[in-house]
Amino acid sequence: MIARALLIATLQAVATVAAAARPPLAVAEIGHFYVGGRTVTIAGVPPRARFRSAGLPPAQIDPNGTFTTGATYVGFVRLAHPRHRYPIVLLPGGGFSGAVYETTPDGRPGWLRDFLDAGHSTYVVDLDRTGRSARARYPEVDPDEPAFRSNAFLWEVLRIGAPGSYAADGGPRAYPGTRFPVASFTAFANGAQPRYPITAEAEAPVYDAVVRAACPCILLAHSASGGGALAAALRWPDQVKAVIAVEPASVPAAPPQPGGPPHLFVWGDYLTPDVTSKDWSEELAAAEAYRAALDRAGTRADLLALPQVGIRGNSHMLMADDNSRAIAALIERWLSRRGL
Amino acid sequence: MIARALLIATLQAVATVAAAARPPLAVAEIGHFYVGGRTVTIAGVPPRARFRSAGLPPAQIDPNGTFTTGATYVGFVRLAHPRHRYPIVLLPGGGFSGAVYETTPDGRPGWLRDFLDAGHSTYVVDLDRTGRSARARYPEVDPDEPAFRSNAFLWEVLRIGAPGSYAADGGPRAYPGTRFPVASFTAFANGAQPRYPITAEAEAPVYDAVVRAACPCILLAHSASGGGALAAALRWPDQVKAVIAVEPASVPAAPPQPGGPPHLFVWGDYLTPDVTSKDWSEELAAAEAYRAALDRAGTRADLLALPQVGIRGNSHMLMADDNSRAIAALIERWLSRRGL
C-alpha cells in the first residue's frame, strides 16, 4: 500500500508540474524493430481476383506461397540523457495497439511522454497482431478469425459504464464520477483493434523476444498483457527489474520463486460486486492471490488500489483516464523508491 | 532534373554528416491522433465462440452491434525548434504501415529521422487499415478480405530482383548492384501488412482529413499513396505546399489546374522494358505524362530519376535502400531550393 501522505505529496507535485509546459525532450533515437516472426508456406488455395488500389484494375492473386508472419513491432524512444538506468517497456492490453500509451483519447500526452519526462527511455509494443505487428491469414495460419469488439462491449468491459449502460435511453451513461474522458469515447474507439486468437504456447516466445531485445528493463503491462509480463519476470528474474501490472487479466499458473524483482499492482474503481456481468473482481482476486504468493516467496509485491488512497472514478483504461498523469507519477514514485 | 554538380555536392555533404553521430533531437511533442472514422451497425449475424487470451477460457461473442471503424492513425513528432515552416507528412505505399519510414530493415534511422534532422516536424500516416489504423469486418463492412502478399511477390514487385528470382536455385537472387539491404529482407517482410480493398470514393476523404489535420504541409507519398497525394494537392492547392511523389503507382484522372504547388517525382532503378511482368514502366509513363501536364499548367514539376544522375541500384523501396539518407538529402535540397 502506498501511504496516503506520500500520495498527497505526489499529487501536489504533479499539480505543480502540470501547470508548467513540458520542456522539450532530448531524443537520441526514435524508431522500431521487429522481434519474432516466422516463415509459413501456404499451398493448394485457388487463385482469386485481388483489389489493388483506387484507380487501378483488379489483379489476379495467388494466395499460395511463402509468407513472413507473426513478428511483433517494438517502437522505441531513447533519450539522449536518461536519468534512470532501465527503460520502461509499455505493453498494451488486448485489442489495443501501443497507441494507447502515446496520447490519451482527448489528446493529452500519454504515459509514453510521462515516463520520458521522468527520464526513462521507453519501448512501446504492438502485441498480438495489433498495430504495426504482422497479421496472418486464416484459416491457413490462424485457427480463428479476429474478434471485433462493439462500442457497447468496450464501454462496459472497460468499466466506463455499468452493464447495459451503453444502450441507455438518451445515450451511453457512464458511471457517476468516471475519470474516463467520455466525450472522447469515439476517438478512443478509433484505436480499438480486433483481437486475434493466441495460445499460451505462442505468447511466451513473444515476451521472451521482447525481453531479449529491450531488457534489462521495467515491464509495465495492462490487462491481457499482465499475465505474460508476470510470467516473463519469472523466466527472466535478472533481466526484468520490476513489473508494473495494471489491472492484469490473468496471472501465471506457476507459483513464483524467491528472488524476483519488485512488483506493483495497480487497480482502478468500480470493482464492487454489484457490477456483475462485466466485473473484474475475479481478475482482482486472482491477482491478489498471486501478489500474496509473491510476498510469501519474499518478493516485494505492492498494491496500489486507487480508491483505497482516495482516488475514485478510474476505469479499466487508467492510461486514458483524465488523471492518467497523476497515476504515472505514483508509479514513477514507486519506481524511485525501489531505486529504479 | 537535379544537376549532377548539385548531386555530387549533396552526396559529399551527406558523407560528411554520416561520419558524425546524429545530434539529439529537441522534441516538443510526440504522439498521434486519428482522423476519419465512422459508425457502422451490424445485425443478424449469429453469436459465436470467441477466443479471449492465453490462459482464459473462450467467451461467447455477439458479432452484432455498433462499431467504430475506418479511422486513420496519424503519428507526429513535433520539433521544439523546427527550422522550416511546414511539416512533412510521410505517406506509405500499399501494404506498408508508417513503420517503413521510421527505421530501415537493416536498422538505420529512416526518412522520419532524416527529415527531423533536417529541421521539419513530421507526421507519419498508417493508411488503408495498415498499422494502428482501424480495420473492418468482412463481409459485413468490407466487400473483400485483405490480401496477404507472399515474400516472392514482395521481392519482385518491389524490384529487389527480377521476376522469378525469389525462387531461384540457391535462394533469392537480387538484381546485380541492388541498394536494397537484401540480408535484411526477412526483417523487412516482418513489416508487410495485408492490403484491404479501398475505392476511390473512400480514399479522397482520408487524404482530405489528413490535410485538414496536418497542413499546411509538404506531402511525401510513396507508390499507392502517390495518386491520393497528387489528387489532394489539386483539391488543396493552398494547404499542400509541395508534393514529393516517390514512384507513384497512379496519377489523378483530372488534369491539373494552374497555380499548384511544386512537385518532385522520384524514381529508382530497374525500370527498363526487359523487366516485364512486374515492371513499373507503365506507372512511370503515366507519372511522366502527368508531370508534363503539370508543366503545361505552369506548375513546377521536377524529375529526379536516380539512374539519370548516376545513382544506380535503387529498388521501389527507396526509403529502405542502403542510400536512403542520400536520397532524403536530395529531396531536402530540392525543398530548400523551393524555399521550403
Image: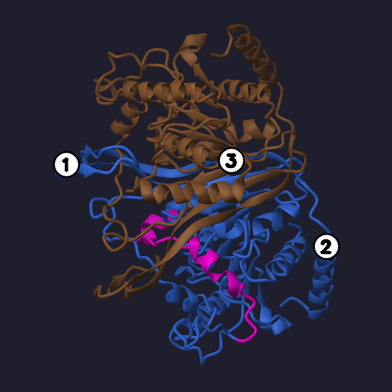
Chain colours: A brown, B blue
Q: Disc number at residue B47?
A: 1
Q: Which residue is mark 2?
A: B17
Q: Position of residue A321 (x, y in %)?
A: 49, 24
Toward which corner of the image does residue B66 lie, by quadrant?
A: top left
Q: Which residue is mark 3?
A: B31
Measuring 65% from the left and 15% from the top, which residue is drawn there? A10
Q: Position of residue A336 (x, y in %)?
A: 68, 24
Q: Earlier in the sequence, mark 1 or mark 2?
A: 2
Query: What's the amino acid at mark 2?
Result: Val
Closer to the eye: label 3 or 1: 1
Distance from Cα at disc 3 to Cα at disc 1 = 37 Å
Q: Disc number at residue B218?
A: none
Q: Is residue A209 visible?
A: yes
Q: Nearer the viewer, residue B159 or A134?
A: A134
Q: Is residue B73 visible?
A: no
Q: Residues within 10 Å of mark 3 (few under 14, many from 20)?
A: many
Q: Residues within 10 Å of mark 1 (few under 14, many from 20)?
A: few
Q: Which residues are magenta?
A: B176-204
Q: Earlier in the sequence, mark 2 or mark 3?
A: 2
Query: What's the amino acid at mark 1?
Result: Pro
Asked if labels 2 and 3 share a chain, the reply is yes
